[in-house]
Amino acid sequence: MKSIRDILNKFDPLEDRYVSREFQAYGVHLAEKLGDGKHKSMYIKFAKTIPRPILDKAYRFVSDANAKNKAALFMWKLKELGAFKKGAKDKKA
């Protein structure tokens, strides 16, 4: 992760968008690590709606793999972990 000094040195308030919540920062971090900056908003939504342990487990799987398209592998692993099933939280309880 970048240091605060690096972020502030590169920050341009006229062009850069603000990140005010922790889940937003985590979503941007995921997008950068997966090399999928084009879909930052999707990762921010995932960070807001999907439990963090599931996201962390999928990210660890991808980071250990030697994949050409890490973003696609991440999405596949999320699907395998059941992150997109409606009511998945309710069924576990």
Image: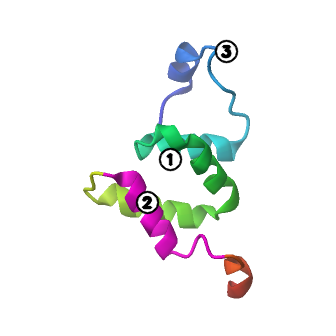
Residue 62 lies within the magenta run:
no
Which label was assigned to residue 30? 1
Residue 61, compared with residue 40, is above or below; it is below
Q: Which residue is mark 3?
A: 13
Secondary structure beneath disc 2? Answer: helix
Q: Is residue 71 visible?
A: yes
Main secondary structure along the magenta-highlighted residues:
helix
Q: Is residue 93 visible?
A: no
Q: Where in the figure is residue 82, as x and y percent of width and height?
A: 56, 76
Secondary structure beneath disc 1? Answer: helix
**Cα distance, mark 2 to mark 1?**
10 Å
Which image quarter holds the C terminus?
bottom right
Instruction: Give the mark nearest the N terminus, 1 or 3.
Output: 3
Q: Is residue 48 left or right of residue 66?
A: right
Instruction: Give the mark nearest the N terminus, 3 or 2.
Output: 3
Determine the residue positioned at 38% across, 61% down.
Answer: 73
Q: Which residue is mark 2?
A: 74
Residue span colored magenta: 69-85
Q: Give the number of marks.
A: 3
Instruction: Give the mark nearest the N terminus, 2 or 1.
Output: 1
